Image (spheres, helix red, strand yellow):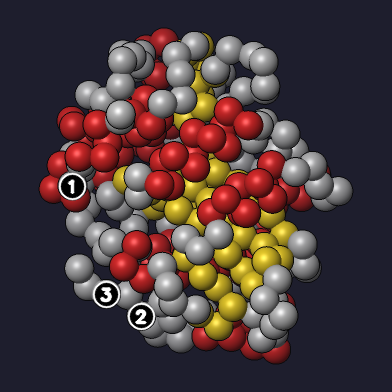
């Protein structure tokens, strides 16, 4: 049984999280001074291992039947939630659609949808790396309260878009997104930005830059600067998301001052 199950919010400190798991991850700057990105190979995807890795700025990215590769790329692609600005066209679409957003209501469906090949690989990237081993690992992290999903539903109640990632304190590590309707993933991303802003999440890690993320307003940060902020971000007190998992948020209200109506505790 993973010892993550016994962790409470007060236990979520950088020191506690980094000490989890059976492996000592190397310092990315020392082991990879040229910034190639891969800093370690092997290990496992146990919940403790994953949380420890993310707390140190690493994430797994590897193909099925290959050794687990742990990455810390240079530069890092990031988004500051309170600096995000939805495009005029996205705002117009949100106002005319009767779509709804939810939090943590269909994590399994979202991660499986993200794992499927897609036709717009140039805009959102190839995601065949989300194979069964990865799905099982992040589903367990979701069950333990660390991984979270945002879902987009159409007016018929069909899941048409979403994203998922991992949250530690005041930082959200984004993993993947998908859409089955035009701009549904962009609306999920906007919903994430508003959720993070309301929850005192200071940074969203987008990992590797690509055209789609940059079009959403993501930027890049030097790896050394990203790593220097991690301890402070992880230690930030922020609102629990599980408390608000049952709520529906109309995409038309994303421009409102308090669309998610979060509880303070």
Vertical placement of residue 61 versus 78, above or below:
above
> Which one is in front, 247 or 165?
247
Q: Residue at x 43, y 62 (%)?
A: 81
The quarter in which the N terminus is drawn is: top left
Q: Residue furthest bottom?
A: 96
Task: From the viewer's perspective, tell me whether residue 218 is left or right of residue 224.
Answer: right
Q: Label 2: state its secondary structure.
A: loop
Q: Which tag is nearer the camera, tag 3 or tag 1?
A: 1
Residue 263 numbered mark, or none: 3
Q: Position of residue 40 (x, y in %)?
A: 47, 13
Residue 157, x across and y down, in percent? 67, 76
Residue situated furthest right in the rendering = 119
* Local secondary structure at mark 3: loop
- Mark 1 or 2, nearer chain start: 1
Residue that numbered label 2 is attached to: 261
> How far is mark 3 from mark 1, CA to CA?
18 Å
Look at the picture and state if 220 lies above or below 59. Answer: below
Asked if residue 102 shows in the view, the reply is: yes
- Is label 1 in a helix, a strand or a loop? loop
Find disc 1 in the rendering and name its residue.
8
């Amino acid at each position: 049984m993973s010892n993550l199950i016994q962790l409470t919010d007060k236990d979520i400190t950088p020191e506690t999280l980094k000490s989890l798991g059976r492996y000592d991850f190397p310092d990315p700057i020392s082991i990879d001074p040229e910034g190639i990105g891969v800093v370690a190979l092997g290990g496992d995807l146990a919940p403790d291992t994953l949380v420890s890795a993310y707390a140190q700025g690493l994430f797994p990215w590897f193909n099925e039947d290959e050794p687990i590769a742990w990455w810390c790329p240079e530069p890092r692609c990031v988004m500051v939630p309170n600096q995000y600005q939805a495009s005029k066209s996205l705002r117009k679409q949100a106002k005319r659609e009767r779509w709804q957003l939810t939090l943590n209501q269909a994590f399994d469906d979202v991660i499986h949808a993200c794992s499927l090949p897609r036709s717009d690989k140039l805009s959102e990237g190839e995601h065949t790396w989300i194979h069964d081993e990865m799905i099982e690992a992040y589903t367990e992290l979701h069950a333990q309260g660390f991984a979270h999903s945002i879902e987009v539903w159409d007016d018929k109640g069909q899941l048409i878009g979403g994203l998922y990632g991992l949250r530690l304190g005041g930082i959200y590590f984004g993993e993947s997104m998908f859409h089955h309707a035009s701009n549904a993933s962009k609306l999920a991303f906007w919903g994430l930005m508003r959720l993070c802003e309301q929850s005192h999440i200071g940074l969203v890690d987008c990992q590797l830059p690509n055209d789609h993320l940059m079009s959403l307003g993501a930027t890049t940060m030097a790896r050394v600067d990203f790593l220097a902020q991690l301890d402070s971000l992880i230690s930030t007190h922020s609102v629990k998301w599980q408390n608000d998992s049952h709520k529906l948020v109309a995409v038309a209200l994303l421009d409102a001052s308090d669309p998610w109506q979060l509880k303070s505790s």
